[in-house]
Image: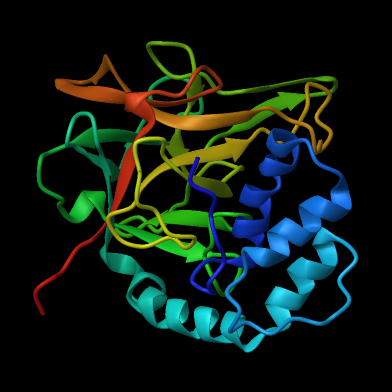
Amino acid sequence: MDIPKYDGNIHPDEWINDIRKYHYIWKVEYEEFLNIVISLIDPTIKLPTEISDIEELRNALKENISFTVFKNTNKRKLQLLKYIPESRALRHVATGKYLSSVENLCYKTGSKLQLVFVRGSDPGPNSLWKIQFNKELATYTDTSITLQHTKSNKLLGISWYGSGNSYSYQKSPTFGSTEVNCGGNASEWKFNYSKSEENHESYLKSNDIIYLSIKKSVDRSGRTTHIGSVEFLRCHDVRFTIGNDNFQEIVCHNERLGANDDWCIELIEQCA
C-alpha cells in the first residue's frame, strides 16, 4: 500500500483526511500513529517540538510557510478559472455533449422554469457558464460553487414548492427524478473528483472530471434542514419533447454513482 507523504504540494486538510484511515488499518495506539504520521512529513518542513494530536498537526502545517507557497501557487493556477468565468463549459463525459440551456425556453411541466439539457459535441453560446466560488481557493474539501448560465444570467439549480405543511421538489418531465433548471430556489453546488479521475490535485482546475451535488435544504414541512438528502447531477438516455424539439433529460438523483454522473470542466477560449 502506497502511504501518502506530505511535502507541501497538497492541502493539509486533504492529506490529514486521507492519512487518518491508516489509523484503523495499522491498528496501533494513537500516540504511535501520531509519531508515524509526523515521520511522513518532509523534514524540510519545520514543526513545533510538541504536537499532541492530529488537529495540532493540521494547524501547524497550515501555519508553515510551505502552505502559504501552496496557496499562492494555486491562486495563480486558478486565476483563469476564477476571473474569466464566462468561458467555462461542462462536458458530460459519457456522451461528449455539453450542459446547455436556452434563455426563456421553459419546461411545460414541473417548475415551468428555464430547462436544462445536454447537446452538441462542441460548446456553443448556450453551453457557457460562469462558475463562482464561496471562498478564495476552490479546494475539493469544502468549497461551494454556483453555475450561472452566461446568456440568461440564471443559476443552475433545483426547485421546491408547496404551502402549509406540504412541500416537495419539482420532478423531471420524463423519468420523475428531481428536475434541474435555471432560475430555481436552490443553486449552491458542491463538487468532488470522480472515481475515474486518477490524477486529481486538491484544487479544482480545467479538465478535471468531477461529480456535482446539491443538498435538498427544505423538508416536507417547508422548514430549512441541515440533514436534507444530497443528490448528484446526472445525464441519462431519457428524452422529452417541447414542441418539435427533442431534449436529453438532466436530473438530480441519490442513487449509486456511475459513468452518467461524470462531468469535465473545460476552459473555452473565445475569439475577441
Left or right: where 210 falls relative to 9 = left
Q: Where is residue 123 in the image (x, y as percent from the top left)?
A: 15, 50
Residue at 82% from the left image edge and 63% from the top image edge: 55
Left or right: where 89 falls relative to 54 = left
If the image is split into quadrants, where does the C terminus sit?
bottom left
Q: Where is residue 53 in the image (x, y as percent from the top left)?
A: 87, 61
Residue at 64% from the left image edge and 66% from the top image edge: 12
Q: Where is residue 191 in the image (x, y as percent from the top left)?
A: 50, 47
Depth check: give the residue in front, 201 or 94: 201
Residue at 41% from the left image edge and 39% from the top image edge: 194
Is 40 located above or below residue 84 in the figure?
above
Q: Where is residue 88 in the image (x, y as percent from the top left)?
A: 29, 60
Depth check: give the residue in front, 87 or 260: 260
Left or right: where 53 falls relative to 217 = right
Tell me the quarter of the picture where residue 114 sits: top left
Depth check: give the residue in front, 187 or 170: 187
Is 163 located above or below residue 93 in the figure?
above
Residue at 68% from the left image edge and 34% from the top image edge: 25
**Colour mapping used in the image:** rainbow
Left or right: where 227 falls relative to 94 = right
